[in-house]
Structure formats: C-alpha cells, structure tokens
Image: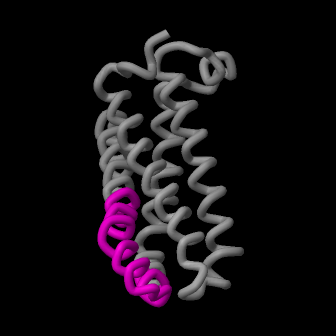
Amino acid sequence: MNPLALYYFMLCLHLTGACIWGGGHLVLATRILPVALREKKAALIQGFEQRYERIGLPALTTQVLTGLWLAYRMLGNSTTAWMSAGGPTRVIQLKLALLAGTVALAVHAKLRVIPRLRDDNLPLMAWHIVGVTIIGVLLVLAGASLRLGGYPIARP
C-alpha cells in the first residue's frame, strides 16, 4: 500500500472510531441518562452499556492505535518533537492528556461504579458519563484543530 493510501486508511479508521465513541456517549448522555435519572432506573444505563461496550471499546482501541500512528507520522520518533511546545505537538499532547482522563474515568466506572450501580447511586454514574462525553467531544475538536491548522490551541 502506498504511503498516502495508508495514511488515508488510518485517518478513516481514526475518524470512524471517533464517530462511534463520541456519538455513542452523546446518545448515552443526552437520551438515555436523562430518562434513567428521571425514572431512577440504573437498568437503563446498564442495558445501554452492555450493548454499546461491544462496539465502543473496539472503537476506542482503534482510535488509540491509529492516533498514535498518525502522531508518529506527524512528529517522528524524536523525543524533542514529542515534548516541544509548538505547532501540532501541543494538540497531540492535549489529546494524550484527554485520553488519560478517558481511561481513568472508564477504569473507575468499570471497576468501582458499574459493579455497584443501583437506582439510588445513579448520580455517581451520571458524572462519569458526562465527563467521558465532554472529553470525547474535546478529543474530536482537538483532532479537527489539527486538520484546520491548529487554531487556537496549537498556536505558541
């Protein structure tokens, strides 16, 4: 496969993963969560999570792998390039920090919140859902800023 075709393929995989991950969490946060909170039914969240996890986690994994590949393609393997404070590096650093936040919330939810989720402690899960959704939207916006010249977060 020629390099440009490979780049395009990886970018398409990355964007598809972003659509699935971000879109799924937007549906959860704006459609499922309000009903679950209003009706005090944790089962609505649990049902969505069980069905969505089969496509959401592979989408997130795809985003991580293709995102690292795309960042490597942009910055190379120089530690200096990955640690610099200018240009696209700042956006990539932001995306890595947001990814760390996503992973932290997801692991905490998976190990601590979801196993104990009941109708009476649903608000704790709601905070996780809102947090992951906001981070997901910020990841999409940061990625778009790379394609649009990096304004405003990539400017020194």
Q: Nearer the viewer, residue 37 or 149?
A: 37
Check if residue 46 falls in the magenta segment. Answer: yes
Does residue 139 appear in the picture of this structure? Answer: yes
Q: Total label count?
A: 0
Q: Position of residue 151 (x, y in %)?
A: 35, 19
Question: Which span is picked out in magenta?
Answer: 20-48
Q: Is residue 35 above or below residue 28?
A: below
Q: Is residue 109 above or below residue 40?
A: above
Q: Nearer the viewer, residue 152 or 18?
A: 152
In terms of image quadrants, where is residue 6? Answer: top left
Q: Position of residue 110 (x, y in %)?
A: 63, 73
Asked if residue 118 lies left or right of residue 141, the reply is: right
Check if residue 142 falls in the magenta segment. Answer: no
Residue at left offset 37%, top offset 53%: 18
Q: Position of residue 39 (x, y in %)?
A: 39, 86
Q: Is residue 24 above or below residue 113?
A: above
Residue at left offset 46%, top offset 37%: 70
